Image (tube, coloured by chain):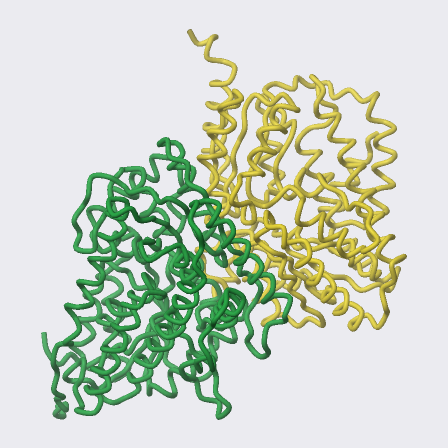
Chain colours: A green, B yellow
Amino acid sequence: MAKVKEYSTEPLKVWNEGKQLRRKYYEDYLDAHERGGLRWAGGAWAFSSIPAGLGEDTYCITGEPHGATIAFFKDFTARCHEATEAAGFPRTLCAYMRNYWGSILLGKYLLADGTVVDKHPAPDFIWQDHICCSHAKWYQVARWLEERKGKKVPMYCVDVSVGYPADKPLEEYKINYIVQQLKDGIEWLEKTTGRTYNDRLLCEAVWNEIRATRLWAEICALNQAIPAPLDEKSMYSLYVMGTLMKHRPECVAFYERLKAEVEDRVKRGIAAVANERFRVITDTQPPWGFLKIFREMEKYGIVSLGSLYTYGLIGMWKYRSDGTWGPKELPQDKPRTRDEAVRMIVEWTVDRPEWAHFYVPEAKTKMILSIVKQWKVDAVLLHYNRGCEGLSVHIAENRHGLIDAGVPVFPFEGNMGDEREFDFPGTLARLTTFFESMGLKKLRE
Amino acid sequence: MVKAFGKFREWIDNRHEYAKALKERTGNKVVGYFCTYVPEEILYAANVFPVRILGSHEPPTVTEPYIFAMFCHLCRDCLAQGLKGRFDYLDGIVEGQSCLHLRQAFNAWRLHIPIDFAHYIYVPHGIQSPHAIPYLTQELAKFREALEDWTGKKMTNEDLDRGIRVMNRNRELMRRVYEYRKLDNPKITGLEAMEMVLSSQMADKEEHSNLLEKLLQELPSRQLNRDPGVRLMIIGSEDDDRVFMKNVEDIGATFVVDEHCTGSRYIWDDVGAHEDRLLAIASRYVQRVPCPSKDWPEFNRINHAVKLAQDYKVQGALVVQNKFCDPHGIEIPPLKEALKKVGVQTYPLEFDVTVPWGQFRTRVEAFLETLTGLEELF
């Protein structure tokens, strides 16, 4: 057997800081009222910089990351699913949503470390956006469930289902449709909470969000290096900050420190996987209860570099004039007024890479192919995710596009948040066969 | 009499032959659409014949490479019809944004089946927002422009008026037929009502309306000579399963009303008058009885379903969810609770491309017994 090159590895220095940030995030939401603060709930894609204008003591909980955290703790997930099914909801619905509803039904709240708190903290209001069939419905039902427990929760949701600017910018009337809803939303927030809205805080939050989502893209771009400084399993714990608090200064600060550290790793040739010799990317959310599959791949010298999902769920990218795909350029100036801030965040957000496939499967295929080329990827693992119709929509078309381009593809079926729908041994056996067909052999047990 | 019902059935059973003959006779282009959010008014205005693309209730195995099987059977079955060449006479396809599932069928069709014209209308989801109507008006202007480019003919206000008139007349006539379902002994069955509406999505609206006029003359004297049994409502995802309707109505029940896009939801609202025709059409599609995918933050569709249940004196409701249809599945418990508050019991059924009638019969019979027959047992 040929000797496989060994790279130096070392743990990330910011790792514990990230963990603490996550823990504090869930605790802040739980304890917000004790400090006279406000709580709101919504999705990871909600325009979170808008409620920030209500004050620095406004805390949110974003549904998808919370659903994923629940999924990681399988016993609690099972209880959530049982509660949701007992309430009459079909088990084929979005798995994150069922986890979230389940915790309301159980009256429990899960912290980042798996601690189960014996009360579910209802939000003061819901602030959501809608592009997937389940987004607004998720919170409509969450509100209905809270109301049955005696708590009326006002809800506002912004419709962003206007298409994707794949080959030309969105028409002005589409941008305006979203802008107008957000401006109405600000008035709604004032009326609902009784607070005076602060445009300065809004402008700061918008700029934070723009910086954070660009910084994350810059960090992911560093993974083009050989050896890759980051592996996808670790990236899941890092990108999540952008899904929780993309508008907050601590998110920007964390990503700045992370970027500096990853740049340093690239400079010194520090690898995520010591015996890296084969580079893959995945697609859509992983089965959160089975992240050990990434460790299994490492035994073959395989590093998973990320995915369009990990790079583009929150990270903002754009095609450059030379045809390469890179972090989206920052606007020239910070916003100074409410009008500027709202328009800026809308124009920034509509390019979100993970919105492309909702409308234009070819656009997603093109982005994946750009990653394959620029990140020097050897194969793509497509997760046909039964738990998320939003990110699985058109995935079969992406498979066609990749195969047509000559990229080896391994499709596998699973569920990000419902372990009953993921066959770990079966998937691992098929994956092993796939890697062996690529000429790889296990380097260690 | 009521030969009309035979004709409706014939139009459904021979939908492709009918469309081909119409195309040959008129020389008009034929466009297939997937969802009732496509404004057919504009297609009629352009002298383009719209037909709804629906499935055939055969296992859609040919779609496996194109649509992940966790998406609903309707979208896969629709695509299967295209892949099998059954809609080979279509000149174009159009979709009005509703759900991810049908969007996927539209895109797979666009990518894998040769077609001259494919247009996606981004019908807003935020229909409870005051900004939805002006936004959709602009989307419809784009649609009109695309059709004009394709057909090579400008659309005038008179054309749009004609399209609106054709659609309004057809819907209004069908609503009048629905009135006969309110009677203690309804003059039409649920199956017949379904076939009436379904065929209107496949036949030329003017021809369909002319037949409805005749039917409405004959209906007052019609006697069904059957015990209507339990007054049922059927609610939920798209449903064109005529076999299921017939089978349920054969075991002591009548569907007196429905809340489906192949039923009342398709015909319930008209286009009003307005100088800006596109705004008038947009208003109709924003304010119509909504698909649950667009119905938030308030549950307006559920309120509408409750009113229907009361108006049609419904005793029980079958709530149908096409497997994997999230918008409908999500609403089942709130819908169930709302109907229960007005004394209407519900029973959920999960539909797939084919329905296991053996199991369903037992379940539906048990449900009917809970509505009427338990006293006799004790």
User: Horizontal placement of B275 versus B12: left or right?
Assistant: right
x 21%, y 86%: residue: A277
Q: Is residue B362 visible?
A: yes
User: Horizontal placement of B301 versus A253: left or right?
Assistant: right
x 24%, y 67%: residue: A237
Q: Residue furthest left?
A: A445
Image quadrant where one finds the N terminus of chain B: top right
x 55%, y 76%: residue: A166
- Residue B356, percent from left and from top: 48, 39
Decide which of A165, A410 is in the foreground and name it. Answer: A165
Q: Is residue B226 above or below residue A297?
A: above
- Residue A395, percent from left and from top: 45, 67
- Residue A433, percent from left and from top: 25, 74
User: Horizontal placement of A218 versus B202: left or right?
Assistant: left
- Residue A363, percent from left and from top: 51, 76
Image quadrant where one finds the C terminus of chain B: top left
Decide which of A284, B226 is in the foreground and name it. Answer: A284
Decide which of B57, B198 is in the foreground and name it. Answer: B198
Q: Is residue B253 above or below residue B21?
A: above
